[in-house]
Structure formats: C-alpha cells, structure tokens
Amino acid sequence: MPIKFRFLQNSIATYYIFGFFITRLNNHDHSTVLSGDKDDGFAFGIMLLVIGLLIFFKSLKNLKMKRLFENVPTSKMRSLAMGLVELKGKIQVEDKILKDPFDDKECVYWRIHIQESVKRGKRRKWVTRHKAKNQVPFLISDQTGSVLVHLDGANMNDVKRDNQYDLATFFSDEIPPNVRDYCRKYNVKLKGWFGGKKRMKFIVTYLEPDDDIYILGNARPLLKNEQKDSKNITAAIDRSNNGLFIISDKSEKELIDEYGGQSYIIPLGIILSAVGFSMILTSLGYI
C-alpha cells in the first residue's frame, strides 16, 4: 500500500474515532456514555484506561522499532563496526546443520508449534499442545565477507511460517508420516476419547542455507575459539550484552510496514485513556 494512501487512511480513521468519543463525552451524564450506571461507568472507565495505556505504550515501542529499521544503516560484513548494526545477507552453514522434524529440510533453525482447537464455553480457541525448537550457529554472508551468528536469546518472532498441516474431525487429509511419528514420539495425542480425530494445527518454521536474512543486533569481536582459518569471518553477533537482537527472513521494507503501518493506533490509545479517565472521574463525582 502506498505511503501517502496509508497516511490518508489512518488520518480518516483517527478523525472518526476521535469524533465518536468526543460526541459522547459532550453528553452531561458521562457515567452512562457506554454503560448504565455510575458503578458500571467506573468499571468500564478502568477498562478503557488500561486498554488505552497498553495500546499507547505498545504503539510507542513499535514506532521506536520502525525508526531503528529506518535509521540504522546497513553494514557490509568486511567493514563492520562493533556495536549496533544492521546486516542483510544469505545464510551459510558454519559447521553443523540440522533437519527439521516435519519436512526433513536442511536448516540452521527450526521451530514446531502444535495447537488444538478446544471448546471453552460457547466458543472454541486454539490451545498450544506442544512447542519445540533447535538451532545451531551459522554465518550471514555478503560479497565482502561473513559474520558468525549465535541465535541464543534472539527475537525470532518475525521469521515467517514455512508450512502448516491441518487435522480436522471430518474431510481432512492425512498428516504426513513425519508429523505423525513426531507426535507419537512426544506423546501428542491426535485422537479424542472415542477415537475420533481432533482438530489440530501443526506449524513448522525453519531457516535454510541460502535464505535471505535480516539481522539487527550488536556485533562484537570474535572470541579465540570462534576464529577459523578463513579470514572472511570478521565478527560475531549475539545477545551477550542483553541488547537488541532481531532476526527475520522478511525484508527491511516488510518490517517497516509491519511496525509502522498503523500510526493512528497511538492517538487511539490516548483517546481511549482520556475517555476512561473522564468516566472514572465522573463516576467518583469529580466532574
């Protein structure tokens, strides 16, 4: 979506949301704006205040990340400076390699997430039944050299899902033998009390050699035991100093759009907090 169009869309949304609440706040009986009596108004005001603050601070965090993606320049591996860096390159095997349990793909990182659809009251929700991951150090490389990457402590939330298998009560395809064998090995039950199939999702994510990858984190000099015969490895990157460490197979543009594409949420958080605070004061008799 073009930036100008998205800005216009967000501005219109903010205008109407703001107008909606201001119109109701002009009503003299603030305690019944969204509820029936003062006690309800106080409770609803607390809820709006909390939700508004959560939205506001979450949005500020996302905005900060967006600006980091935009402002930290991309470094070449050969001329890498120590400290916070942005790296773009391809994954290369450093020493060891893995195979993911579901698709048997060679990779340096895999993550499994198995969920079951469970009825809770009148609704159904997805409940995690099993999670697992494995990883090995690898290299991120460009035309100028390579950097050693240790994944421990990395934020991998922006690594895209690679495959998903579904199991439904009726009319679903059989899940692959590798998935079934994995579930049997780790005691993940696929059938219910009466032998019927459960409704389940089996999600696998992995990073393969030659995948394009984006890293934002802190570079450091190689330790003695990390130095190899090859002089192309210029530094290492990890979370040894507990700093920012994000790894993604999305492009920089995708990350910027994802973290900054809903700029109207910040004023929405302020509006909800203001409405909630006003309702609390009104119910307590201060307004």
Image: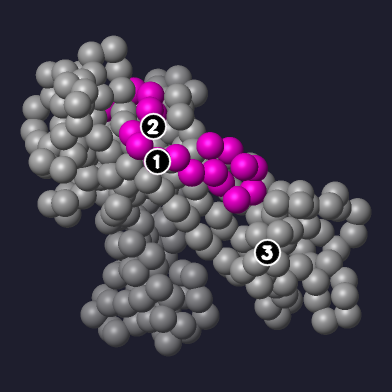
Residue at x 41% of width, y 48% of height: 135
The residue that disc 3 covers is 183
Of residue 22 and residue 116, the one placed in the foreground of this image is 116
The residue that disc 1 covers is 96
Where is residue 219 shown, x and y percent of the image? 15, 36
Q: Are marks 2 and 1 in contact (CB under 8 Å)?
A: yes
Q: Which mark is residue 238?
A: none
Residue 219 in sight here: no
Q: Quadrant of the C terminus?
A: bottom left
Q: At label 3, which amino acid type do we have?
A: Cys
Which of the two discs, 1 and 3, labels the residue nearer the N terminus? 1
Which of the two discs, 3 and 2, labels the residue nearer the N terminus? 2
Residue at x 70% of width, y 80% of height: 121
Indicate which label's residue lies in the foreground, 3 or 2: 2
Where is residue 241 shown, x and y percent of the image? 13, 52
Residue at x 43% of width, y 33% of height: 249
The answer to whether 43 appears left or right of 194 in the picture is left
Q: At label 2, which amino acid type do we have?
A: Val
Q: Are marks 1 and 3 in contact (CB under 8 Å)?
A: no
Q: Is residue 275 above or below residue 109?
A: below
Where is residue 217 shown, x and y percent of the image? 21, 39
Pick out the residue farthest to the bottom.
39
Indicate which label's residue lies in the foreground, 1 or 3: 1
Q: Which mark is residue 93?
A: 2
Q: Is residue 53 above or below residue 227?
A: below
